[in-house]
Amino acid sequence: MSPSILPVDPFDYVVFGGTGDLSLRKLLPALYQRDRDGQLPSAGRIIAVSRTPLTSSDFRAMVGDALRRHVPANEIDPAVWQRFSARIEHASLDATGAAGWPDLAGLLAEGADRVRVFYLATSPELFGPICKRLQEAGLVSERSRVVLEKPIGRDLASARRINDEVGGVFAERQIFRIDHYLGKETVQNLLALRFANSLFEPLWRSGSIDHVQITVAETIGIENRGSYYDRSGALRDMVQNHLLQLLCLVAMEPPLSLDRESVRDEKLKTLRALVPVGIEEVGQKTVRGQYRAGAIAAGPVRGYLDETEISADSTTETFVAIKAELHNWRWAGVPFYLRTGKRLPEKVSEIVIQFRPVPHCIFPADAGEIVPNRLVVRLQPDEHIRLHLMTKDPGPGGLRLRPAALNLSFAETFKHRFPDAYERLLMDVVRGNPTLFMRRDEVEAAWGWTERILDAWALRGDRPKPYTAGTWGPSGAIAMIERDGRTWHDEPGALE
Ligand code: BG6
């Protein structure tokens, strides 16, 4: 079956930060792909807004360049490019000053009855001021939506302030807080795995599951985002949003339906069940690391402190491991080990559900060790779901046990292209479907839990532990899980 294309209403997509990295690397390629698949209506415009004085044709040339870099060559179709580039405009304006707004208003007046999306791919301090200007310029209509890129603030107070400011202009149903992990095919597949199959649900609880691991490892460093990253760190950049969202999808109760509130209600309950990690536990339950010079597959790389725009005595963490726990009926006593970092040996995101060992062994000792079952959901790359089971080693010579895996590889099973996360999410905004976006209360609950850890680290005042680029983080992360008699599902080849 090929993926079906749901048409969307005519729209104007206004991207603030339109010449920035996210816009050129992700948003415009995603919109191009939707155009290539025939999803965009003929009345669909993309208006990139930035401070740079650029004509629309200069900007179209920039987009052409960006597509050549970020879209596979065999997916660039000259006819689609011609149609797509005709949709693109650029408007120069000062987001915090008065200049340029009348021009933007003039452009938008041409499509007054269209869905109007304001995508704020800017720093979060500008979210409130831009919304205020949009309102003053009379650009917010009933059919308008605003998309907020993460991070929404840097702690609970700033997140609340931003939510208040944006909420003063847009109703909650018009606000789309994006977490691109929720747009990834395999992340949505978690919903299918759990709720379109009856097999796992009776086992999906503390009686059967020993623990869960969530790893999001990256080989890249901080690229050219030093000034943002140094104020942020792995906990704010990755855990507060992406890893906690993954945890929610694994741990939440079955929602009543996929409607806009049911899924988010269940995620919120999960976030509220997270046990706070305060100053007494933070040394045992968290590990922070910072990479030093080392080597990844591509070659030698410098250390974090030598990256551009990083202060020489920075204590920002580029790696974090956390033992998270949920105080609720289903998950009491089941740790969720979370781990993410830059400059690790490979780019891999996966969720490991580790089942409990068999209660009693009927096999003789020389039959081999019984390895407990493990369900591995690989989100990227090489997307798959793998269930590790014990089997009998074939052939004569007595009964020998051997682990083997049932493997559902998405690339092999479904031959069509895997769309980028943004493709789905950008179209959901036009359709007005916020199910895969974060609600205000969710973002604030996630900050509440994260902020306790940040505060505890600040009170302890210790520096992140160094780790060599190209390794799996500081040894403390291994010690943390080994203290509980468990190990990380590290080398993805290990059990396969
Ligand atoms: C972003 C973070 O949200 O996610 C980046 O700000 C990180 O630091 C990126 O590199 C990872 O996303 P993906 O889709 O490549 O796993």
Image (cartoon, rainbow, N blue to C red):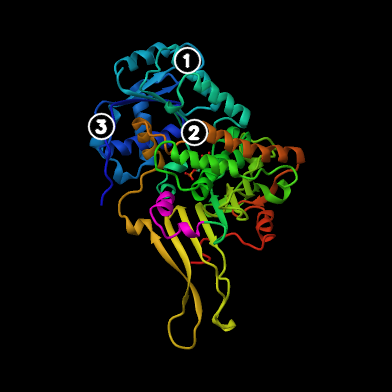
Give the residue drawn at x 52%, y 58%.
Answer: 353
The stretch in magenta equals: 189-204
Q: Amino acid at mark 3?
A: Gln
Check the image and report above or below for 289 versus 82. Answer: below
Which numbered marker is on residue 133? 1
Asked which secondary structure carries label 3, the reply is: helix
Earlier in the chain: of badge 1 and badge 3, it is 3
Give the residue drawn at x 46%, y 64%.
Answer: 387
Horizontal side, residue 425 vs residue 150: left or right: left
Mark 2 surroundings: few (<14), some (14-19) or many (≥20) residues within 10 A: many
Q: CA distance from mark 1 to mark 2?
A: 23 Å
Give the residue drawn at x 37%, y 18%.
Answer: 141
Which numbered marker is on residue 439? 2
Horizontal side, residue 268 vs residue 30: left or right: right
Q: Residue furthest bottom?
A: 397
Q: Amino acid at mark 1?
A: Arg
Front in this rendered view, residue 192 or 134: 192
Q: Magenta includes 201? A: yes
Which numbered marker is on residue 332? none
Asked which secondary structure carries label 2, the reply is: loop
Front in this rendered view, residue 313 or 439: 439
- Disc 3 marks which residue? 82
Task: Respond yes or no on whether mark 1 lies under 8 Å from ligand 1.
Answer: no
